[in-house]
Image (cartoon, coloured by chain):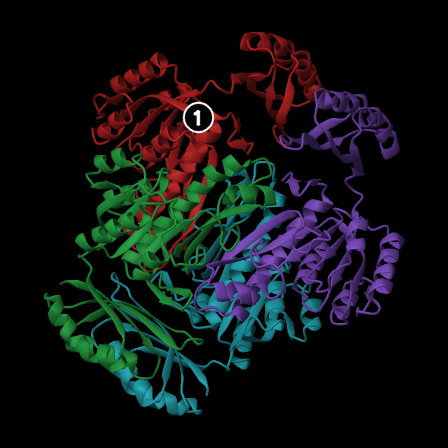
Chain colours: A purple, B red, C green, D cyan
Amino acid sequence: MPNYVMSVQCADGPGIVHAFSAALLDAQANITDNQQYGDPITSQFCMRTSFSSPIGDIEEVRRHLTPAVERFGARFRLRNEQSHEHVLIMVSQYDHCLLEILYRWHAGELAIEIPVVVSNHETCRPICERYGIPFVHLPVNAENKATQEARLRELVDEHDIDFVVLARYMQILSPALCEALPGRIINIHHSFLPGFKGARPYQQAYERGVKMIGATAHYVTADLDEGPIIDQGVIPVEHSMDAHTLSVMGRDVERQVLARAVQMQADDRLFLIGRRVVVFH
Amino acid sequence: MPNYVMSVQCADGPGIVHAFSAALLDAQANITDNQQYGDPITSQFCMRTSFSSPIGDIEEVRRHLTPAVERFGARFRLRNEQSHEHVLIMVSQYDHCLLEILYRWHAGELAIEIPVVVSNHETCRPICERYGIPFVHLPVNAENKATQEARLRELVDEHDIDFVVLARYMQILSPALCEALPGRIINIHHSFLPGFKGARPYQQAYERGVKMIGATAHYVTADLDEGPIIDQGVIPVEHSMDAHTLSVMGRDVERQVLARAVQMQADDRLFLIGRRVVVFH
Amino acid sequence: MPNYVMSVQCADGPGIVHAFSAALLDAQANITDNQQYGDPITSQFCMRTSFSSPIGDIEEVRRHLTPAVERFGARFRLRNEQSHEHVLIMVSQYDHCLLEILYRWHAGELAIEIPVVVSNHETCRPICERYGIPFVHLPVNAENKATQEARLRELVDEHDIDFVVLARYMQILSPALCEALPGRIINIHHSFLPGFKGARPYQQAYERGVKMIGATAHYVTADLDEGPIIDQGVIPVEHSMDAHTLSVMGRDVERQVLARAVQMQADDRLFLIGRRVVVFH
Amino acid sequence: MPNYVMSVQCADGPGIVHAFSAALLDAQANITDNQQYGDPITSQFCMRTSFSSPIGDIEEVRRHLTPAVERFGARFRLRNEQSHEHVLIMVSQYDHCLLEILYRWHAGELAIEIPVVVSNHETCRPICERYGIPFVHLPVNAENKATQEARLRELVDEHDIDFVVLARYMQILSPALCEALPGRIINIHHSFLPGFKGARPYQQAYERGVKMIGATAHYVTADLDEGPIIDQGVIPVEHSMDAHTLSVMGRDVERQVLARAVQMQADDRLFLIGRRVVVFH
């Protein structure tokens, strides 16, 4: 029996759960997992439901649910669990985040498809070739930035990309690109935001003498390092560690935090409410 | 408008969510939080739902839900969030867990009532008196154990106790007592179970040279140190720490883990399925 | 045989360890623990040594070490482990950090003396009286701030205070006071610095949607929230927690981090190098 | 100027630090880091010292230190920091620990040499070939075990191996082999020892309903899963995770804990005292 995941986001009010559970019953569904959250500030309602149903045609399942979706004006997603999100990864020269994602994907731990990797450097081409993933080199400078971003958006369309992952991609995306893909670009910042925004966060952390360093996965917005936070991690450090050592240690946190964020996005566990992210673990 | 928390546990099957959400709609309820879990092994279904309703009489709310409860043969609890669980605390001579619970309760962080503290020693009487909580001294030896447990059960009945907390109570309860209060006695064991069962776990941990020590909150069953685990915590330790230092450090973990477990029990977040505990955070 | 702890801080160079170990041998000392650090940036050398010696008179031990101290122009401290630091605690209305320190002190876990607690409110007087610790009420307003700080400095002198602990003391100390006690005032800030400086950090954290909150123990300098960091801790949080819940959860981190910092200061484990703190665990 | 690391282990007593610091002064050394530990139970003394010296010939440096070594009958190691330990890795079919070590080695984060990888399966050959590391297939069964272990010991000799890493190698080594390389074989066990010894620890953890799973790096002895513990790590888990999910999550802990243990062994930070391991971080 196929398993489905549905996501619902709409203005809160009575009857939502009842309407959707009635529609699911109508689709002969058995709910295997369900999480909800009603945000008291924005009055937004979010729900993620896993269910199995004997109906094999996803469009038929969708037809059962459409009246409830329309009644509440909900943002709605429905996915067969066997059908994986398409992810475009962008990387520069640091390869640890890319390798982590590719490793988990290859080991069957991360249920995504990776149709293409894009980079402004050639450095990571051999890694991608080894895994049989097309690698597109889009070097960026002041003159060609608009052209290259246009090319990038073509790739997003061509490969039916669900979301983009910046796996230590060291170029700033244009506001236009950020706004074109809201809640669909995930970045890993190598600090525990909001501490140490901007460049060289490990050097900043060293100079400030912090006792823990961290990494932050967040959605990219036009407002640099201010995007909604998806996940964070930290690791304790000691006085004897210099900025280089901090950066080496920090890579462990970066790749874990980014991998978790990608997994949660791929599993439809993230809901964007204003500047905050609801996470259904 | 009053807030209610309801807990449902029954055999899994289609229509449960729909039936309860219909009943809630009928009770003019707005669901503020809902968590569900269907256990694939035992086919048990658990659900915890918070909701507000304009109906102020809990018995009237209950009447709306009773048909659904009966239809699925569910174990069912309904509580007005303002009405707190009654907790009986048992303690011996170590006072750190007792103090932690009393501090949180007094600070308004832990929504419980504590009608009585029972101890086999007089040591903690002054602490309880300071907080204005009745303290009952029930010293235990081989001869009087049955009598004292009978007195304890009277206290449970007199004070309408919902659950018992063993806050480093160093006596073993009789199997009869354990079985009389299934899922209603919480113990803190001073090790990361199943490692270091039995006596002197910090000494065992020291001798084994572990690099982390921990504590485990679990339901008490007749099978010592084998009860279903509610929560666990750990702390890293170093070679230079002796067994006494481990025990001092471990107390920090014990009191935090036990306080969390008590809070979750008091919030109806724990469901016992066989030997495993479902925790809705 | 008495145990001593000595701290040495001076410009790095060859022969320091040799000179001190020779002096210790001369004092018939057996080194039980020794930690050193040479800072590559400032070329400062720090060393903390525990040793036992049959010489019972600390001044006689000091005489053996003085030539080495003078040769390297070192900042030097020598303490009999049985002789505890004198700590003045300042508090406002939140009592959790004060209670944590008093609890650990009373349980024999924190080897300090607390001759006096100072507060700008009467709130915590009963707690101090319960523990038999003198409580001095020094309310502060714009007019009397200088007078009250003068009174505070008298208390520091009268009670031979080694260091001051701001246990959620909500007044800003004057630059003059900060500079009078360099490396001798420890504050707990209720955020993971440098994120969320200033007022209402939990509200800031909530609005920013962070996934972990933290606390920072640091030395107080005239530069608010910018003092050298001693220790930090974090705890994961979820979207469903509002600013109040974050502040309740954060208190757990605050009291643990502050208690650790006080313990390390009392054990002579902290060395201040510029804006960074060397910590010998 | 070259940097050296020396390790000293001997019976504790007065004068050790003085003798070695005198010898180092004699070798014109500047100590950059020094850690010591005197074990109160076994009266063993351990010291790890990093120092720079203008003397480029390690044998000349050793000559300065030999009298102190002989005087205290110490186990002594001296290494130029540029000269890396030779590590033989053994693996079966799970590749995550192998990949982690090879990644860190290749990224320059792990200062070791890996002359050869040995496996009882062909699975990991392509990974090793990709990194240019010789791969030796030594399939093991009841008949050929002694022969294959003899071949393994030849490889240890041929490649001048300093220590062996069992990176999820699923065969039990013979007692004779364990005893031939004491403190020189590191294993990763996929549980938080001493919990869940033996086979299928994630299944055991699932059935026991633990709330955290872990991994343990330890020295291999003839006594299975009882060897001295080097490092441990844990990760929280939830009721909804089945044994397979636990094993996937556990792999993250396994590879991090093993990588840390290998790094500490390669940096001469581990000292074996009876059944306990001293770790100088």
Coordinates of residue D180 in the picture (x, y in percent): 43, 71
Tell me which residue sits at (52%, 61%) in the image.
D258
- In this view, which residue lies farthest toward the front? C143
Q: Is residue D49 left or right of residue A40?
A: left
Which three-letter amino acid code belongs to the residue tagged 1? Answer: Ala
Tell me which residue sits at (63%, 44%) in the image.
D244
Coordinates of residue C268 in the picture (x, y in percent): 28, 62
Q: Is residue B8 left or right of residue A2?
A: left
Residue topped by disc 1:
B111
Tell me which residue sits at (59%, 71%) in the image.
D105
Residue B161 lies, with reference to residue A55, above or below; the image says above
Residue D57 lies, with reference to residue A74, above or below; the image says below
Residue C187 lies, with reference to residue B121, above or below; the image says below
Q: Is residue B213 left or right of residue C103?
A: right
Q: Quadrant of residue C51?
A: bottom left
Q: Quadrant of the C terminus of chain A?
A: top right
Which chain's residue wears label 1?
Answer: B
Number of marks drawn: 1
Few, some or many residues within 10 Å of mark 1 (<14, 14–19, 20+): many
Observer-nearest of B27 and D262 = B27
Mark 1 element type? loop
Observer-nearest of C80 and D77 = C80
Observer-nearest of B101 and D258 = B101
The answer, for residue D172, to whether it is visible in the render is no
The answer, for residue C114, to whether it is visible in the render is yes
Q: Quadrant of the N terminus of chain A?
A: top right
Coordinates of residue C58 in the picture (x, y in percent): 13, 66
Coordinates of residue D189 in the picture (x, y in percent): 51, 55
Observer-nearest of A114 and D148 = A114
